[in-house]
């Protein structure tokens, strides 16, 4: 038996488990890239309008930090500026989650030990995980290329943009493969891989916004910077694709060497011993839940603060960026609900943070189902802790964590915009109130997940995330898709006051809060009446 024995069956198994998730990542990324190309063509049909946009976007440091440098003023070049790096980030995230799930997560859960008892080679699980990640990125490259060509863009530039994103995805898939060998747990492995992705983004962002030559060369140290250096639609540099390919080969080889030299279930990094005695925080289910969620919440907070500051800083020059397109000004006004373009932009940013916060709250609530299906809930419920206390521990974190995230986002957006506009105090106050106004709507969406967990536990994960996706779809694309108003009214975010600049009304906030409490109460009540597991 060779080290690659049974790689084929394991690859098919991984595809069967992850095909839906991977297809969703690929379709969303493809729709984003092709949609941006199409709408840029509609919003900026003339070279003069595109030149105004390129001049404003290329000199706005916040937008350069957020997206990338701009090379050219064609529709394709603007698409690569707006979505090239982020398409690579989405591809990288897809690869990281797929590789970690099919290697370290399965090993931690004991599934690989069961599989390994059959005629399975030592390297078969790692090979299968990487093969699935490569297949997903290959599909992404093909669909993005086709989508851009259908949007009227040149085939050469379309292929360059698609291959740059897919190459970054494969490179970070190999980063995840090595992280899976280093860490003894899936959460730590994901943290290492995501930390590497964050470092790559910061290197690229600092290099793009730097004015001195030594710092600008930092972009060559970042796989996301290499995506930019391919220069799609601006005289493609095909040779730049060799950089992520070389890194993927080197990291992949290191992962195979590490897999051959470590013990099953162990990682190369030494385990950090815990305290000899548990702290008082772990004496109850609430303390245990906080201990388990604290690291994840810290990551969410860091992301909200970072993105809030960048989006807020970009608001200072948003008028000049959008000034050449009256259609885009109207679109931002529609989403944000304001007549002033800056207020419309800030309101749209706050609304998006509210939707992301709803996704966080939903993920925490659905962790109850994960603990139930993996058997982690049984040891807790075997103690004096009852079902309601166990479930309320997660619900409490969902509520508190969402409030903290929105508070941080409001402060970061207000500071980012206010420091550039010269009115930090007033901007922070306004944006903090606007962000917290999203809290009842976000919790109402999470309340749906709690209700489903109690009433329909087997379907709660799928329907719960479908509710989040539907809320996002209706709020952002509802009028564009001509969704009926009665359907739009189902979304809690339809009823949130559109701030800053809009009319403040307490009634929607009260009704949304009551709806969130009612949904959660019904779900918790149903939990008491059904079997666990």
Image (cartoon, grey):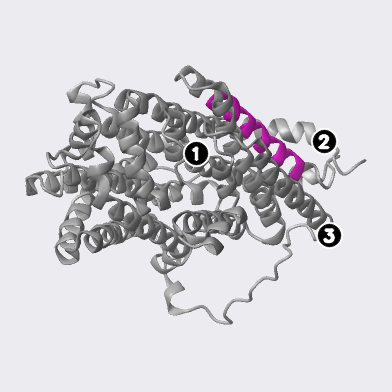
User: Mark 1 touching mark 2, by CB under 8 A?
Assistant: no
Asked whether the viewer can see residue 529, the reply is no
Q: Examine the structure image and report whether residue 133 is included in the region drawn in magenta.
A: yes
Image mark for residue 84: 1
User: Where is mark 3, residue-wise?
Assistant: 261
Tell which circle, 1 or 2, labels the residue nearer the N-terminal end. 2
Q: Could you tell whether 265 is left or right of 300 in the image?
A: right
> Which of labels 2 and 3 is toward the front?
3
Magenta-highlighted residues: 126-144
Q: Position of residue 460 (x, y in %)?
A: 41, 38
Q: CA distance from mark 2 to mark 3?
A: 20 Å
Secondary structure under tag 2 reads loop
How busy is the neighbourhood of tag 3: few (under 14 within 10 Å), some, or many (20 plus)? few
Q: Position of residue 185 (x, y in %)?
A: 63, 59
User: Where is mark 2, residue-wise?
Assistant: 6
Q: Could you tell whether 96 is left or right of 117 in the image?
A: left
Q: Quadrant of the N terminus?
A: top right
| Residue 262 or residue 348, whichever sits in front | 348
In the picture shown, does residue 229 fall above or below 181? Answer: above
User: Mark 2 touching mark 3, by CB under 8 A?
Assistant: no
In the picture shown, does residue 356 fall above or below 408? Answer: above
């Amino acid at each position: 038996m060779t080290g690659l024995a049974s790689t084929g069956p394991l690859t098919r198994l991984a595809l069967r488990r992850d095909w839906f998730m991977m297809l969703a990542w690929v379709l969303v990324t493809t729709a984003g890239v092709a949609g941006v190309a199409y709408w840029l063509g509609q919003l900026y049909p003339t070279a003069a309008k595109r030149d105004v946009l390129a001049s404003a976007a290329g000199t706005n440091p916040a937008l350069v930090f957020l997206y990338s440098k701009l090379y050219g003023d064609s529709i394709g070049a603007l698409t690569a500026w707006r979505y090239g790096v982020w398409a690579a980030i989405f591809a990288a995230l897809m690869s990281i989650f797929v590789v970690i799930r099919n290697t370290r997560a399965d090993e931690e859960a004991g599934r690989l030990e069961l599989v390994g008892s059959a005629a399975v080679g030592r390297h078969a699980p790692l090979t299968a995980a990487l093969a699935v990640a490569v297949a997903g990125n290959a599909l992404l490259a093909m669909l993005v290329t086709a989508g851009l060509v259908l949007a009227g863009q040149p085939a050469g530039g379309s292929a360059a943009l698609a291959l740059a994103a897919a190459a970054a995805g494969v490179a970070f898939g190999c980063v995840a493969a090595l992280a899976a060998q280093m860490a003894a747990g899936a959460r730590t492995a994901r943290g290492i891989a995501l930390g590497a992705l964050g470092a790559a983004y910061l290197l690229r962002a600092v290099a793009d916004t730097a004015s001195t030559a030594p710092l600008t060369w930092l972009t060559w140290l970042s796989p996301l910077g290499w995506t930019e250096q391919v220069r799609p639609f601006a005289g493609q540099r095909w040779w730049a694709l060799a950089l992520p390919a070389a890194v993927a080969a080197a990291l992949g080889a290191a992962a195979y060497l590490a897999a051959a030299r470590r013990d099953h279930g162990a990682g190369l990094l030494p385990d950090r011993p815990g305290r000899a005695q548990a702290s008082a925080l772990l004496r109850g289910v609430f303390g245990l839940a906080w201990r388990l969620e604290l690291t994840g919440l810290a990551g969410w907070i860091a992301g909200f603060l970072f993105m809030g500051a960048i989006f807020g800083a970009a608001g200072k020059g948003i008028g000049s960026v959008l000034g050449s397109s009256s259609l885009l000004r109207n679109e931002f006004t529609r989403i944000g609900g304001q007549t002033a373009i800056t207020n419309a932009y800030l309101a749209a940013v706050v609304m998006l943070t509210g939707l992301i916060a709803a996704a966080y709250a939903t993920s925490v609530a659905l962790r109850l189902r994960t603990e139930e299906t993996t058997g982690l809930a049984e040891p807790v419920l075997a103690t004096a802790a009852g079902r309601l206390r166990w479930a309320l521990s997660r619900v409490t974190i969902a509520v508190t964590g969402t409030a903290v995230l929105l508070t941080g986002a409001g402060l970061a957006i207000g500071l980012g915009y206010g420091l550039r506009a010269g009115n930090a105090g007033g901007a922070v106050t306004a944006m903090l109130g606007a962000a917290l106004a999203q809290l009842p709507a976000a919790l109402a969406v999470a309340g749906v997940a709690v209700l489903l967990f109690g009433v329909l536990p087997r379907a709660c994960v799928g329907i719960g995330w479908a509710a989040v996706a539907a809320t996002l779809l209706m709020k952002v694309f509802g009028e564009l898709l001509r969704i009926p108003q009665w359907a739009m009214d189902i979304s809690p975010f339809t009823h949130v006051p559109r701030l800053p600049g809009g009319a403040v009304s307490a009634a929607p906030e009260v009704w949304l809060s009551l709806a969130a409490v009612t949904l959660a109460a019904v779900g918790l009540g149903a939990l008491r009446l059904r079997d666990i597991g």
